Amino acid sequence: MQLIIDIGNTHAKIAVFENTTIITQRRFLWKEHQDIIQNIFLDFPKISSGIVSNVGKLEEKQRNWLLSILPDLHFLSHQSKIPFQNEYRSPSTLGIDRIALMSAAITQYPNQNVLVIDAGSCITYDLLTAQGIYLGGAIAPGIGMRYKAMHDYTAKLPSLEKQYPDHFIGDTTENSMHSGASFATICEIEGVLTEYKQYFKDLTVILTGGDAVFLSKRLKSTIFANLNFLLEGLNYLLEYNRE
């Protein structure tokens, strides 16, 4: 069994795989990681290896604690082996999570042009060509970040949870904010897809991340929603770096 740990900007995810099948997974705040991981090992004592993707703040003492629990643990980095050709001009700054997503794309959709949209704290767009070449993409504020920015950087706008407006013309301040954050995000994604499809006619689009379900119900374009895409990419990278 393999232990997959994804430490994001807001939450962390942990999953246990048996070969390519997810046995269990949990989403939690990273400050709770010791209790969560210890319980995972109690429930699944056959875990023998693992991988960590860290875009949050993994302290050295936390890293050492993880290694004391599971010595055969790979920390994904820019020195790790990857199954695609990376044409990003600043490869050392490419997010570890984006590397995992492209690894999932090339293994699950070989010989296809794939655009992966990860709707989390930020919304990232990443393109892999049918030739297995990663070209790059875009990074934009996520839905939650847009709501938070409107509240934090103004004097009177309220703090709201994401909600899709009844109409794109907001008739109250709250509805106007919902239109500006939720509805506008949908329009942004549709616009980005239109641009990509001008250059890549046969384009497979994958939507993942914490807001994937919220967005997928409203996008008009044909997409494949996969909430576990990053975890699946990490699981593949674990085996790829063990070979």
Image (cartoon, rainbow, N blue to C red):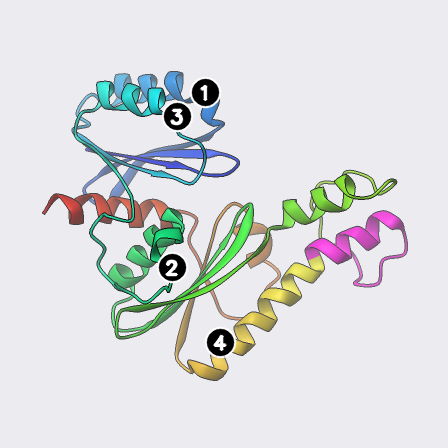
Q: Give the mark nearer the N terminus: 2 vs 3.
A: 3
In this picture, which residue range is highlighted in magenta? 166-182
Tag 2, which secondary structure?
Answer: loop
235 up-or-down from 190: above or below: above
Q: Do the residues labelled 1 and 2 touch (CB within 8 Å)?
A: no
Residue 65 sits in which quadrant?
A: top left
Q: Nearer the viewer, mark 1 or mark 2?
A: 2
The foreground one among 179 and 138 is: 138
Tag 1, which secondary structure?
Answer: helix
Residue 237 position, x and y percent, is: 23, 48
Tag 3, which secondary structure?
Answer: loop
Label 1 sits on what residue type?
Glu
Q: Name the residue under label 2.
A: 90
Can residue 220 be spotted in the picture?
A: no
Q: Nearer the viewer, mark 2 or mark 3?
A: 2
Q: Which of marks 3 and 4 is in front?
A: 3
Residue 160 position, x and y percent, is: 75, 40
Label 3 sits on what residue type?
Glu
How many angstroms separate mark 3 from mark 4 (CA)? 38 Å
Which mark is drawn over residue 59? Answer: 3
Q: Mark 4 points at which residue?
A: 196
The foreground one among 207 and 150 is: 150
Q: Are marks 1 and 3 in contact (CB under 8 Å)?
A: no
How many angstroms separate mark 2 from mark 4 (CA)? 22 Å
